Image: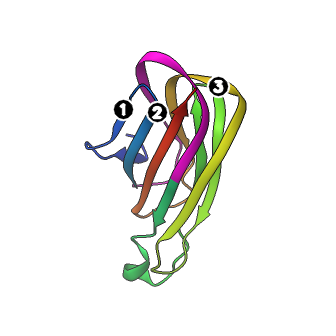
Amino acid sequence: MSSVSFDTGCVVTATPHSVMVMTEMYCLSAGTTIKDFKLAKPVTVDSVQGTLSFYGLNWPWYKRGNTAICGTIGAGDNVLLAFDIQGKGNQPQIIPVYATFSDGIELSTLRFNLHPDLTLPTDFRVALAFMVK
C-alpha cells in the first residue's frame, strides 16, 4: 500500500501554452511514494509558477503539530522542484513557487517523488502551471 493517496480529482492538463497540475494528496503513513502523470505528447517548458500547500490534519487531534512532507516534482528523473515543508500547528503552509529554466526542459512525464516523514494523516496540495516554450 502506498503511503500517499492521490485524490481521484487530480488532473494534469496540457494546452498549447502550458501544462497545468492540480493535485491533492493525503499522507497515511511514513514511506516513499512515486507517481507519474504521463503527457500524451512531450513539450518543452521554460518556467513554472503556482503554489504548494500543506496542512497537518493531525494537529487538532494530538496538539503536536510535528508533521512534515518533503520530496521532488520533476520531468521524469530530472528534478524541477524540491521541497521540505514543516507543519506549523493548525495553520496551513502556502508556499509560492516560481522558477525559470533558461534552456527549457522537455516534459513528457510529470513525476511526484514524495518522502513523507510522518505517521498520521496530512493534506498536501499542488497547483502549478508549467509554461510551454
Label 2, label 1: how many angstroms apart (C-alpha)?
A: 8 Å
Instruction: Kindly identify the amino acid type of the residue bearing the numbered disc 3.
Output: Ile
Dot 2: what SS? strand
Q: Are marks 3 and 1 in contact (CB under 8 Å)?
A: no
Q: Pick the quarter of the image with the N terminus.
A: top left
Q: Earlier in the sequence, mark 3 or mark 2?
A: 2
What amino acid type should be assigned to the residue bearing mark 2? Ser
Seen at 45% across and 69% down, the residue is: 56
- Disc 2 target residue: 18
Q: Secondary structure at mark 1?
A: strand
Which label was assigned to residue 13?
A: 1
Residue 70: percent from the left, percent from the top? 60, 53
Which residue is disc 3 drawn over?
Answer: 105
Question: Hey, which quadrant is residue 16 in on the image?
Answer: top left
Circle 1 residues within 10 Å: few <14, some 14–19, many ≥20: some
Residue 84 on image: x %, y %: 64, 57
Q: Is residue 72 magenta?
A: no
Q: Nearer the viewer, residue 107 or 46?
A: 46
Can you tell which of label 2 and label 1 is closer to the viewer? Answer: 2
Magenta stretch encompasses residue 37 = yes
Residue ID at (53%, 35%):
131
Q: Which residues are magenta?
A: 27-50
Q: Are marks 2 and 1 in contact (CB under 8 Å)?
A: no
